[in-house]
Amino acid sequence: MTSAELPASGRTPLNGGLNGKGLALIPRTDAKQTLKDFKSDQEVRWCPGCGDYAILAAVQSFLPELGLRRENIVFVSGIGCSSRFPYYLNTYGFHSIHGRAPAIATGLAASRPDLSVWVITGDGDALSIGGNHLIHALRRNVNLNILLFNNRIYGLTKGQYSPTSEIGKITKSTPMGSLDKPFNPISLALGAEAGFVARTMDSDRKHLQGVLRQAAEHRGASLVEIYQNCNIFNDGAFDTLKDPGTRDEITVRLEHGQPIVFGTGENERAVRLSPTGGVEVVRRAEVSDGEILVHDAHNPDPSLAFALSRLDEPAFEHVPMGVFRSVDRPSYDHLLNEQVATATADKGEGSLADLLHGGDTWTIG
Amino acid sequence: MTKQVQQLDRVIIRFAGDSGDGMQLTGDRFTAETAQFGNDLSTLPNFPAEIRAPAGTLPGVSSFQLHFADHDILTPGDAPNVLVAMNPAALKANIGDLPRGADIIANTDEFTKRNLQKVGYPGNPLEDDSLKEWRLHAVPLTSLTVRALDGFDISKKDAERAKNMFALGLLSWMYNRPTEGTIKFLESKFARKPEIAKANIAAFQAGWNYGETTESFSVSYEIKPATLAPGVYRNISGNQALSYGLIAGAVQAKLPLFLGSYPITPASDILHELSKHKRFGIRTFQAEDEIAGVAAALGASFGGSLGVTTTSGPGVALKAETVGLAVTTELPLIVVDVQRAGPSTGMPTKTEQTDLLMAMYGRNGESPVPVLAPATPSDCFTMAVEAARIAVKYRTPVMLLSDGYLANGSEPWRIPEVSELPDITAPFTTEPNGEDGTYLPFKRDPETLARPWAVPGTPGLEHRIGGIEKADGTGNISYDPDNHDRMVRLRQAKIDGIDVPDLTVDDPGGDARVLVLGWGSTYGPIAAAARRVRAAGHKVAQAHLRHLNPLPANTGEVLRSYDKVLLPEINLGQLAMLLRARFLVDVISYNRVRGLPFKAEELAAVIGEVIESD
Ligand SMILES: Cc1ncc(C[n+]2csc(CCOP(=O)(O)OP(=O)(O)O)c2C)c(N)n1
Ligand code: SF4
Ligand SMILES: [Mg+2]
């Protein structure tokens, strides 16, 4: 371990040795759990065909495999179609206010290390009104799993463009086309030096669950962008990534330790370092094996992961999916609780009487 | 030389100098000596808004006023009897408050041509006769200090810096203060720089000796200790008392305290103070903004902590939506607003009572919140405990309205025994409360109307809460019109039903016809004014509201039993408007919004006028 990895006090290893064991402090159960255990009795009210259904089903069937006590799982959400999510899970849940879920979850996770805390948020919720809270939760590295349902539209308010909508988007609020450049949520999260950053797809259950598993095991803040189809206001936004005819030509599957290649047959392509310092896509046939970039999700320097996130520029020409970055760094909740423990160990548990009588006192009578 | 000793019953001293002159420290030390001696006291610091205003300028003047007496007193005093002016700016900024005949101790070394010019003095006021109506003591404080420290192994700058200790020594001699505390204080403050410690102590003693030997000071004064209620005392500021009250509230509630806060004057000291006490299990979180501060506190409350957020007016404006969420999810939360002059940035270091209506109504929807206001610096402790009690017992956000005057002012505080504090434990719900083992998160306690509080980690009670309207009982999402009407009324009834002590009236004769009412930090000046009015042979009753929502049950009855009700407020009549609307009583408002506390003399005159017109 390098000194940079040591927490400020230097007492215990990084995150108390819990790295890769993001769930170690959370009570487990031996009882067998099934999908049904995680279904609440509330009627699900998304539009028929909405991508949120697929994500809900994937999460409900994935949670049992974590083996956690259900009462120690909490879903916190903001406002938006996606933020209704907690109502449909039979765990503890808090459907809060627009954009503030990361902040609410920060207080919860920092004060309750025995909870597995999940944040459900939308592209408007996380990146518009709540953008500040999102970057700070990532920067602080609070032990949260943030699932950002990106449908590139405001669903709940009936279809205005969002901070991930493409330029020129025609919506009710932008009849002549939207003017502002969208955020790339992955680039943003990497810019905030998030420890775990991944992208997945509502309809690809296996991939989605694989990413969720890694996010849960990561100790610290995880950001998972989930492309989610809003079939009412932005239908087909991710069709090129789903259609078997185009899918494999544009999807860049990132796997740690594997060379980054994609496409099929003659169209097979590879990613290599570019002379300008970033990365570039080249024909597979034109490069030697040694030139192909091998994906290193554990690289402490986020620059390459950031460069990979920029492959999606122009948007949807090639779209990396999977875990961009999975790097351990001290988590805020761990450090905070360690300060509390250190203060208590060094000076003893606080005594109210001593506190009140501290400083200069005098007695009358 | 024999010196005369004169008895006084009270004195008001103001130390004034450049922000770099250490006037706050000097005032604090004089206060500590005075507290140690056993006088009653009240203090008021006044700092410049700028962190480092240019040296020697009017905006750079920092001052500290201390009122002490042989009897119990209520305010830091209207007008100083003694002004210590460390430079021309300090003299110019404060002379207007100084009654004729008061003492001025001026540091002549700083009255240079350049410094005089900086503040626009055409000549040297210490040398012409412009100060002839005051008792001027022109003392070369800096050069005397430097001379006294000749031989110490310190820089000239460090020697000059010790001039505030010279001044403190002189004043300590003048008022026969005990000195051991200051010597000990200096030893520990400069423990790592023993030469500086020794030099400061030498300067302090030189100041004392100067008083004793020089002719300019022929009289020293004695102010006998006050007879206060028996007990152990300490001097405490409002912000410190409020911090301790929050800790005590959490301890008494048996909950870990979580503070989410964003720095803002004059509330930051509470964040600083609580950050020092992690061994009470306190987690302090400096958030990215006020919204995140309150949101994190609410998240912690959801998890079973006592969530607290501390701020001032502009921050409360940002927190409104989250407070509304706390109202509707019915979770405990304490929102501390240390009010300052507004609107907008206003005057951050100046005091005001202008956030009452925001605290009451500054949210969307019918969103009732209990509102409390401490009356004095030490009362901030009691009211913080009370805020915790109400928040926990009724599962509600509570607004605690302090202000800049209480926050920075200080007074002796009889330290309560821990056994005197209320036990405010609220047991978490751990068992199902519905039929067939279900959990109904909004099934209320029939008496308090509080909902159960089951925290994550409790098996079998998994549930979801949120900002959408909830069905009575189950807490499920509900758009049913009648359910909404019922929930709106239930939330209101819960707050209206909070157990609040009756309003007590101070009316020594029992037959006053005029009531002077107040709330919050105006208590001291109002009570001092009432005393003056009574001393002059008139009758006035006084009552002070510390619970503003709900109001004490007997409020209407009290108001109606007087011919006239006078209500001084440092706003344009916010409580008056509430009382008129609620009780149809023709309250007479007296309002000044100058960023400063009322003066007792000013209020005595106002009360006098109301009595005369009765
Ligand atoms: C303070 C506040 N402002 C505005 C709204 C209205 N509003 C609700 S959801 C939403 C946008 C939601 O978009 P997104 O986060 O992308 O979620 P989606 O519905 O697409 O899942 C807006 C603007 C609100 N509820 N609260
Ligand atoms: S509006 Fe779009 S995002 Fe919202 S529920 Fe309907 S399909 Fe889903
Ligand atoms: Mg959206």
Image (cartoon, coloured by chain):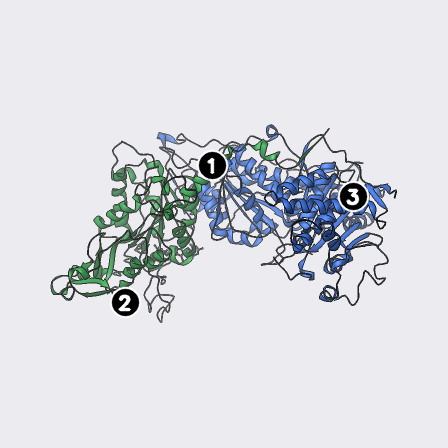
Chain colours: A green, B blue
Q: Is residue B31 left or right of residue B444?
A: right
Q: Amino acid at mark 1?
A: Arg
Residue for badge 2: A314
Residue drawn at x 22%, y 65% as measured from the top left? A281
Residue B41: x and y, percent?
A: 73, 41
Instruction: Give me the residue at 63% from left, 32% from top.
Output: B416
Q: Is residue A22 left or right of residue A317?
A: right
Find out whether the residues at labels 3 and 2 contact each other: C-beta distance under 8 Å: no
Whether tag 3 and tag 1 are in contact, CB under 8 A, the answer is no
Q: Are marks 1 and 2 in contact (CB under 8 Å)?
A: no
| Among the two numbered marks 3 and 1 on one chain, the one whose residue lies closer to the N terminus | 3
- Residue position marked by numbered label 1 in the rendering: B451
Residue A356 image position (x, y, % from top left): 60, 35
Q: Mark 3, mark 2: which one is toward the viewer?
A: 3
Question: Does ligand 1 reach within 8 Å of label 1's beta carbon?
Answer: no
Which chain letter matches label 3? B
Characterize the local packing of mark 3: few (<14), some (14-19) or many (20 or more) Cα atoms within 10 angstroms: many
Q: Which residue is mark 3?
A: B173
| Separation of marks 3 and 1 at Cα, in angstroms | 61 Å
Q: CA distance from mark 1 to mark 2?
A: 53 Å
Q: Secondary structure at mark 2?
A: loop
